[in-house]
Image (cartoon, rainbow, N blue to C red):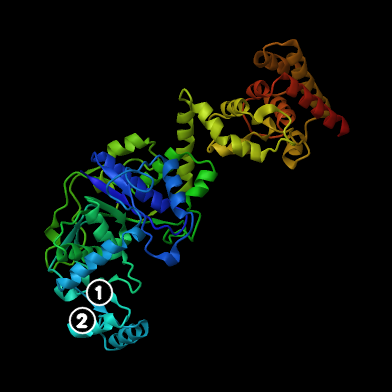
Amino acid sequence: MVLLRFAPSPTGPLHLGGLRMALYNHLYARRLGGKWILRIEDTDATRFVPGSVEGIRKALDWAGLDYDYGPERDGSHGPYFQSERRDLYRQYASKLIDNGNAYRCFCSVDQLTEVKARLARSGSNSTYDKKCLYLSDEEVARKVKAGEKFVVRVNDDLTPTRATTHDLIFGYVRDAHLSLATDPVLLKSDQFPTYHLASVVDDHEMGITHVLRGEEWLPSLPLHLDLYTHLNLSPPQFAHVPILLNADKTKMSKRNGDVQVVDYIHRGWEPQAILNWLALSSWGAKHLDPPLPSDTEPGSKSSRPPSPIHLEDAPDSTQLMTLEEMISDFDITAITHRSSVLDVNKLEFINKHHLMNTWSKPDGLDELAQRVHGFVKQTFPSRLVACPYTTIDGIKTAITLLEGRLTNIHDIPQHAPYLFIEPDLTTDEAKHMISGIPTDQRLHVLNALETLIKSNGCILKSLRSERQKLGINQKTFMTVLRYALSGMKDGPAVVDTVRALGNERVLARLAAARGEDVAT
């Protein structure tokens, strides 16, 4: 069975880069008819942030990314917290020591720092002098018995010869052993594993067939393949996804930039729009002809595959896609080789159209109103509200009135505060609207609408007739009405606003506007 895993660290809220990685794992698993695991990599206790796991799960649930196995889910692949798998890592470290592919290192931090500096001064690229590799079995046993702390290092003298490695996204890439530290640490002195050992052990034990992870792990791929070889295990297929960047081109992280998923949830963005936005951030041209490793033979300087002759056009960067459509169209070879900067303007465009798609569904309007209900009530406390528009039905009316104008469901208070509270006609915007319009004209317009409402006539047709009768141009006529009804120069059609407010509230606002005119 095709099985993938999303393996975040519980070091804070899930950020957009993490959500995109979960999305790609979900898309690829579903595209191949497989499943995926949520695995929590919590072996670094110093960086653990309480509540992180629950936050990660809530973010995935909000986005509709349902993992098949993991915390709070049944399955035979657990435990799903690496801190609960420490005995397993120690067993594998012992196997590597027993077969000579790893050894215990007792050097202190100070000793290692001095050795690294000495090697650098001598012009060596090595970062460790392998001193502990040459300890006798008796010396090692004595030190262990004495309780001396040690780490377990892989012996890179036994590195398999490998000219290239293959990645599902980057194709054939040059072997990168020279970029690795000398004899990388697999098990730390506190007997917790490093990522290198833990990921290899867990991916094997859990039966992972495909590993999608960040591009920053691509240089470590040779080491991980070495461990599979040393342990006589078959490796999964690897795909390294280029990272997301902040607007200033720095690497996206939980500590830098406006990138936490929870912030986007609180601001009312549509989950389908966020997924659509993230998916397209790295969706490039599809390779119809698989790249060949012809230029990556031993001695070749190239580390990337040759460009395929035939490419299928990439999706438009604002193409609207449902999760089901993303799954259907997803191809791992279509992910670009470049890091991507997220463009919020594209999110606004995509979100607006996903909103429109949602409220066009049978229960979509009710769903949106339910979701934004708490935010509206918080924005307009009951003591300030002069109408029942903070009810679900009232909010549904507001959404309908603002259809086509909303970029985000939380924009309702910004675009139509006059539905919830009386307009403030003393603002600069309101005063500017009627500046230059004679008082008698304003009163004529206000009185005309009042008469029409009281006569229960057809407002749209009658307003046109009244305007012509008064000899007032269209712009002036409608500006006066917008001033009285909302105090805002932009908004939905006046007739629609009248219907949404209701006759009683409209008449009260016309009276208030006339009073303002008299005072002026």
Observer-nearest of 337 and 476:
337
Residue that numbered label 2 is attached to: 133
In the rendered image, which quarter is residue 149 located in? bottom left
Mark 2 in CB contact with mark 1 (< 8 angstroms):
yes
> Is residue 82 visible in this depiction of the protein?
yes
Observer-nearest of 246 and 295:
246
- Is 330 rendered above or below residue 497? below
Please rate how many residues cluster around mark 1, counting C-alpha atoms within 10 Å: few if below 14, some from 14 to 19, many from 20: many
Q: Position of residue 219 (x, y in %)?
A: 26, 65
Side (left or right) of 144 relative to 362: left
Observer-nearest of 465 and 137:
137
Side (left or right) of 252 relative to 114: right
Q: For the view shown, which residue lies furthest in the right direction?
A: 519
Please rate how many residues cluster around mark 2, counting C-alpha atoms within 10 Å: few if below 14, some from 14 to 19, many from 20: some
Q: Position of residue 3 (x, y in %)?
A: 25, 46
- Is 470 rendered above or below residue 217? above
Give the amino acid at mark 2: Leu
Residue that numbered label 1 is attached to: 153
What residue is rendered at 28% in x and 40% in y?
A: 30
In the rendered image, the quadrant that contains the N terminus is top left
Q: Which of marks 2 and 1 is nearer the N terminus?
A: 2
Side (left or right) of 366 relative to 217: right
Q: For the view shown, which residue lies furthest in the front direction?
A: 145
- Is 344 rendered above or below residue 350? below
In the rendered image, the quadrant that contains the C terminus is top right
Give the amino acid at mark 1: Arg
